[in-house]
Amino acid sequence: MVEFIANSNDRLDVVVSNELKISRNQALNLIKDCLVNVNHKPALKPSLKLNLDDKVKVNFAQPKPQINQFEVNFDIPIIYEDDDILVLNKPPNVVVHGASSLKEASLVEWLNEKKFMLSNLNGAVRAGIVHRLDRGTSGAIVVAKTNYAHTKLSEQLSDKSMGRIYLALTDLALKQECIIDRPIGRNPSNRLKNAIVSNGRSAKSAFANLIQNDNANLIAAKLFTGRTHQIRVHLLSINRHILGDNLYGFKSEKDKIPRVMLHAYMLYFTHPRTGEKVEFIAQPYDDFMSIILKNNTMENFNEKTKPSYLNSIFSDLSSWLCI
């Protein structure tokens, strides 16, 4: 619980955001979840104008676990756990958090069923969720157990000191290592897709070849921004497609690939409690590995995906082609 005296006449969500040093969206979720009181009464409107010296109380009590609407019929490997954070290897085709259109259990419901303590800065539906992965994308994701950890991790997400290196299987190899710096926004002709648009939000990605063969090409991608479908949209802009990504143009008559072959392989950030720089590896799932190992050896895959090797690739981008 945090209590403070309002020192401005701003909106409630603005004041809570500034006082707690959290995002406006997190402040909105706290208010919507009835966790904010003004002058000892629940405040339900984010737009409420405060008066000077109003007493504001934010209750960080753990939200009651939601009753699962759907059966949790999957498990999620735990890469690391302590009192502040949980690092998971999200399986493919698991949605991170619920939505009105979702008719199956999400990762958050799995967390609730396992009775993990979770932060509530993003509300009960997104409890503990700092960042997300698309449904078909597998790999490393960090979950905040406490509001303190959530705040610190969100700061790193904003200032880009938290990062991920992805592995992807593509239909064609890259012509060369490259940086794609092109704005991304909603596709004007298809609401399910994003696209390179002149008035979109800035988006920057770096791509490198790791393994090239006739069956599938393994590439690595590092993001400098976090736009929805960013890797998929940027690859499409250079006529490259991730295997299984039918939404963004992958076509194959021979192979029936049920999901996008994109995996968040490395996750790095500063631990919110200890201040130590940490790095985690999420091993790719069997469906991903079975494709790359058709014409490759495990030894070669391990050599090309060593964290030290991947870090060295992206350590100096000054000579890379920038598109």
Image (cartoon, grey):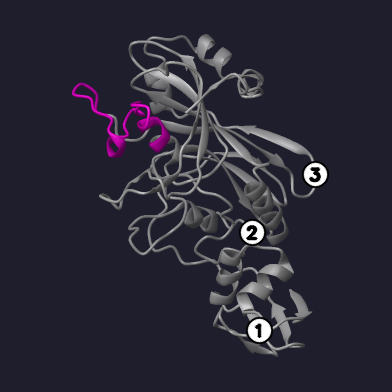
Of 181 and 42, nearer the camera is 181
SS under mark 1: strand
CA neighbours of label 3 inside 10 A, class few (<14), some (14 to 19), many (20+): few
Q: Which residues are magenta?
A: 233-256
The verdict on residue 202 being magenta is no
Residue under label 2, please give it: 117
Q: Is residue 202 left or right of residue 83?
A: left
- Which residue is tagged 1? 37
Q: Nearer the viewer, residue 296 or 252?
A: 252
Type of amino acid at the residue the image marks with label 1:
Asn
Which label's residue is closer to the chain start, 3 or 2? 2
Q: Secondary structure at mark 3?
A: loop
Whether residues under marks 3 and 1 lie with C-beta atoms below 8 angstroms apart, the answer is: no
Camera-near label (3 vs 2) is: 3
Q: Is residue 275 left or right of residue 88?
A: right
Distance (Cα) linking label 1 and label 2: 23 Å
Q: Where residue 106 sits: x, y (%)? A: 44, 53
Residue 4, located in which quarter of the rendered image? Answer: bottom right
> Which badge, 1 or 2, is on the more N-terminal residue?
1
Give how far apart the Cα atoms at labels 3 and 1 are.
33 Å
Please state which amino acid type lies under the numbered disc 2: Met
Badge 2: residue crowd in 10 Å (few <14, some 14–19, many ≥20): many
For residue 258, what is the image quadrant?
A: top left
| Mark drawn on residue 275 | 3
